[in-house]
C-alpha cells in the first residue's frame, strides 16, 4: 500500500501564493506519475497537473500560467507552487499518485488539503 501525506494549504488573500507538498511512502515501487487534483464544493474533482517520471507534464486549464508542478523522484515527493491565487482557486486539493503493478496502473490519493482564497 502507498501512503500519501500532504502539507501546505490554508487561508490566503487573493493574489498571494501557496506551495503544497505531498510525500509518498510505503509501496512506492513502480510509481509512474504524481500530481494534483482539486475539488470545489458542488463541483467534480478536476485535474490540476500531473508529472510523469520523465518530466512530461499534463496540466488542466486552472494550472496554466499560474501554477508550477515539480517532483523530487528520489524523495517520492511532488510539489505544487500556486501563484496569483484567486477566489476561484478555493478547493480541496488532492495529491495523486499512479503506480504500475501486476494489476495494471493503480491510483492512490492523499487525504486532501483545503485551500481557501479570501478576497
Image (cartoon, rainbow, N blue to C red):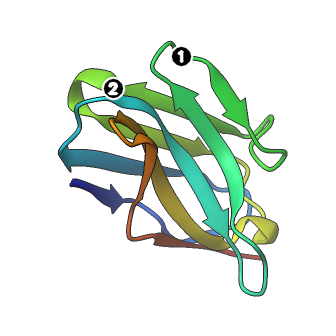
Residue at the image position 34 percent from the left and 59 percent from the top: 7
Residue 27's place in the image compared with 38, above or below, is: above
Nearer the observer, 62 or 98: 98
Nearer the observer, 89 or 106: 106
Residue 41's place in the image compared with 81, above or below, is: below
N-terminal of the two: label 1 or label 2?
Answer: 1
- Quadrant in which the C terminus appears: bottom right
Which callout, 1 or 2, points to the residue nearer the camera? Answer: 1
Residue 33 in the figure: left or right of residue 45 = left
Instruction: Provide residue 65's location: percent of width, then percent of height.
Output: 80, 34
Nearer the observer, 76 or 91: 76
Nearer the observer, 75 or 15: 75
Callout 1 crowding tier (Cα within 10 Å): few <14, some 14–19, many ≥20: few
Q: Which residue is mark 2?
A: 72
Q: Which residue is mark 1?
A: 55
- Quadrant in which the N terminus appears: bottom left
Amino acid at each position: 500500500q502507498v501512503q500519501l501525506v500532504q502539507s501546505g494549504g490554508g487561508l490566503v488573500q487573493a493574489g498571494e501564493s501557496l506551495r503544497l507538498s505531498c510525500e509518498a511512502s510505503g509501496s512506492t515501487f513502480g510509481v509512474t506519475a504524481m500530481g494534483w487534483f482539486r475539488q470545489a464544493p458542488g463541483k467534480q474533482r478536476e485535474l490540476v497537473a500531473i508529472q510523469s517520471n520523465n518530466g512530461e507534464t499534463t496540466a488542466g486549464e486552472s494550472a496554466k500560467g499560474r501554477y508550477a508542478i515539480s517532483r523530487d523522484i528520489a524523495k517520492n515527493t511532488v510539489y505544487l507552487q500556486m501563484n496569483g491565487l484567486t477566489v476561484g482557486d478555493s478547493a480541496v486539493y488532492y495529491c495523486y499518485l499512479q503506480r504500475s503493478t501486476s494489476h495494471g496502473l493503480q491510483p492512490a490519493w492523499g487525504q486532501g488539503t483545503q485551500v481557501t482564497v479570501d478576497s
